[in-house]
Image (cartoon, rainbow, N blue to C red):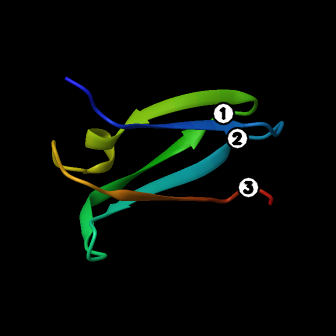
């Protein structure tokens, strides 16, 4: 099967706290979201299921973080 994923890269020299939230086509939150630390100068991958998207459904994912612009 195929599952969507989110690739993130922190190109700073400090870790950042990242929150991913998924929304369905009508704007409803799917699942509780996911918050985690992204280490400095690191790349991380998270699956749509980890964020709370039910299998086989559409979602838009919003990423927020506490790092600089």
Quarter of the view holding residue 22: bottom left
For the N terminus, the image quarter is: top left
Disc 3 versus disc 2: distance between alpha carbons? 8 Å
Expressed as whole percent of the image width and height from the top left, the position of residue 57 reads 19, 51
At 55% from the left and 51% from the top, the residue drawn is: 18
Q: Earlier in the sequence, mark 1 or mark 2?
A: 2
User: Which residue is rendered at x = 83% and y = 36% of the image?
Assistant: 13
Side of 62 relative to 54 (left or right): right
Q: Which residue is mark 1?
A: 39
- Distance between the Cα atoms at labels 1 and 3? 11 Å
Query: Would residue 57 appear left or right of 65 to someone viewing this image?
Result: left
Residue reaching furthest left? 55
Tag 1 near tag 2, CB within 8 Å:
yes
Q: Residue at position x 16%, y 44% from top?
A: 56
Q: Position of residue 49 (x, y in %)?
A: 26, 41
Q: Is residue 10 left or right of residue 69?
A: left
Q: Is residue 62 left or right of residue 65?
A: left
The kind of secondary structure element at disc 2 is loop
Neighbour class for label 3 at 10 Å: few (<14), some, many (≥20)? few
Secondary element under disc 1, as helix, strand or loop, is loop
Q: Earlier in the sequence, mark 1 or mark 3?
A: 1
Mark 2 closeness class: few <14, some 14–19, many ≥20 residues within 10 Å: some
23 or 38, nearer to the observer? 23
Badge 3 marks a residue whose secondary structure is loop
Residue under pointer 2: 15
Q: For mark 3, what is the residue?
A: 67
Q: Is residue 24 above or below residue 17?
A: below
Query: Which mark is first along the chain, 2 or 3?
Result: 2
């Amino acid at each position: 099967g195929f599952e969507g994923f989110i690739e993130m890269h922190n190109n700073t020299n400090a870790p950042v706290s990242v929150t991913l939230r998924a929304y369905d086509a009508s704007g409803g939150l799917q699942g509780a979201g996911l918050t985690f630390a992204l280490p400095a100068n690191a790349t991380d991958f998270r699956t749509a299921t980890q964020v709370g998207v039910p299998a086989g459904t559409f979602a838009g994912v919003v990423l927020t973080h506490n790092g600089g612009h």
